[in-house]
Amino acid sequence: MFTTRLIVSLTEFGLSIFLSIFMVFWSYKSFAQVQTAFDTEAELKKGNVAVAILLASLMVAASLIMKKSLYPVTSTVTVYLSAPAESSVSFWRLLFYCLCHLVFGFVITVGSIELSLRIFEKLSTAYDEDQEIARGNVAMAVVMAGVILVTSSYLQEGVSSLTKSLIPRPALGQLRIGP
């Protein structure tokens, strides 16, 4: 029993490390690519703090949303490792489920954050937020970071629920608790 719990815990820890590295790198690259108003990497090289604030808030928001999408993956792996004799699912099918869940969750996360950001920019017509951030307007970047973080707090449950409903969890048997 101790060995099983240790393996499950180490697996969850490994998934957490993998997901954190994945989220930091790919959210940075994804948001830098979808931002068309300015060249994100060139602005960062110039020391544009406003762009850095915007990008950092996008990465934090994506990570907060994806953290909710990690639970179905870790719970599925926990059941699989805790009751391997009960499962008729192969390791490769489980791996495929986990990868699909995480990749789909990431795509939905990036898309929904970008969509909500663009809708906010359309609704606020007093100024062009992208141009202000490109010019280094830190105040505008802080406001947009707030918009991004508040939006992500509402998107967490929705993205998690959507990924769970669209990618069905494989039947793994039953986990028995107690003697």
Image (cartoon, helix red, strand yellow):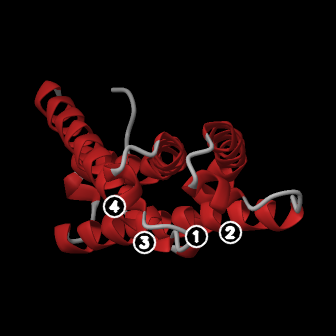
Image depth: mark 4 or mark 3 in front: 3
* Label annotation for residue 129: none
* Label annotation for residue 111: 1
Within 10 angstroms of label 2, few (less than 14), some, or many (20 or more) residues? few
Kindly indicate whether the residue at mark 3 contacts the one at mark 2 (C-beta within 8 angstroms): no
Disc 1 from disc 4: Cα separation? 13 Å
Residue type at mark 2 is Leu
Q: Nearer the viewer, residue 95 or 19?
A: 19
Residue type at mark 1 is Gly
Q: Nearer the viewer, residue 162 or 129?
A: 129
Q: Is there any visible trace of residue 53 in the rendered image? A: yes
The residue tagged with tag 2: helix, strand or loop? helix
Residue 171 in the image, given as x and y percentages of width and height:
41, 67
The residue tagged with tag 4: helix, strand or loop? helix
The image quadrant that residue 6 belongs to is top left
Of the image marks 2 and 3, the number of the one nearer the N terminus: 3
Within 10 angstroms of label 1, few (less than 14), some, or many (20 or more) residues? some
Kindly indicate whether the residue at mark 2 contacts the one at mark 4 (C-beta within 8 angstroms): no
* Label annotation for residue 26: 4
Q: Is residue 110 left or right of residue 28?
A: right
Disc 4 from disc 2: Cα separation? 18 Å
